């Protein structure tokens, strides 16, 4: 369920880039760091977009490249068999959470969105990610599925930017937050039930 289900197809699309990075022996952490920097710039672009609407042009590209970085780091790490795999996973998760928080806090504190709605959405996103990681720590599997995963959020952010650029109506910021909040709460429930089934069965 969700865009995550097409990840194998996306990885095949990125295969030529992955092969180049593997030949150059680019460490996966550098790919993670690139995704983080891309997201931080995206956060600033969203925050200042009501004053400079053209900055939203960056958001669909950011959404694609952040998603690509998240796919590429695992592909490269497996091929290079980098040492300290466990710590690499920690860094990956840590950078991802900073990226998620930065993007949605940038939207939360932008002048055109409802602050409490953005705050609640950001908390829900972080709780869903925390549950997914906690599942693995407790002996289950790392949960990626559900209605509203990371890739789904990136697609909706890109779509929000396009709609604002086309209509010059900033109401799409709150529309996005409501969609992500509701989808994330459903995802939280889905991942909770899967985790409970794995660990209690």
Image (tube, grey):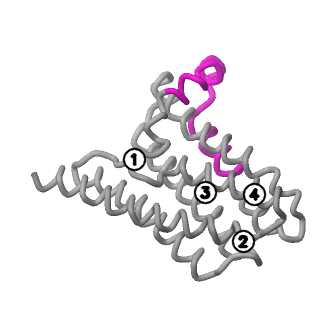
Q: Which label number is shown at residue 99?
A: 3
Q: Residues within 10 Å of mark 1 (few under 14, many from 20)?
A: some
**Left or right of 136 in this view: 149:** right
Disc 2 to disc 4, how far (Cα)?
10 Å
Q: Position of residue 102 (x, y in %)?
A: 64, 64
For the residues bearing labels 2 and 4, Cβ distance under 8 angstroms: no
For the residues bearing labels 3 and 4, Cβ distance under 8 angstroms: no
**Label 4 residue SS:** helix
Looking at the picture, does residue 157 appear above or below residue 85?
below
Foreground tag (1 vs 2): 2
- Comes first in the chain, label 2 or label 4: 4
Disc 2 to disc 3, how far (Cα)?
23 Å
In front here: 72 or 48?
Answer: 48
For the residues bearing labels 1 and 2, Cβ distance under 8 angstroms: no
Foreground tag (1 vs 4): 4
- Comes first in the chain, label 1 or label 2: 1
Magenta range is: 9-38
């Amino acid at each position: 369920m969700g865009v995550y289900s097409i990840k194998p197809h996306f990885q095949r699309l990125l295969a030529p880039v992955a092969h180049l990075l593997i030949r150059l022996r680019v460490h996966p952490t550098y790919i993670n760091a690139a995704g983080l920097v891309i997201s931080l710039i995206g956060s600033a672009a969203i925050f200042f977009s009501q004053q400079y609407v053209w900055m939203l042009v960056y958001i669909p590209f950011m959404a694609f490249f952040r998603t690509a970085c998240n796919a590429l780091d695992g592909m490269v790490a497996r091929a290079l068999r980098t040492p300290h795999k466990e710590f690499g996973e920690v860094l990956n998760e840590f950078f991802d959470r900073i990226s998620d928080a930065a993007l949605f806090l940038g939207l939360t504190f932008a002048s055109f969105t409802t602050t409490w709605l953005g705050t609640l959405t950001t908390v829900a996103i972080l709780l869903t990610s925390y549950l997914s990681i906690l599942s693995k720590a407790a002996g289950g599997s790392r949960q990626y599925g559900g209605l509203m995963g990371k890739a789904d959020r990136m697609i909706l952010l890109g779509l929000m930017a396009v709609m604002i650029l086309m209509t010059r109506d900033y109401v799409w910021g709150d529309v996005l937050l409501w969609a992500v909040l509701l989808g994330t709460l459903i995802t939280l429930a889905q991942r909770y039930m899967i985790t409970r089934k794995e660990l209690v069965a």
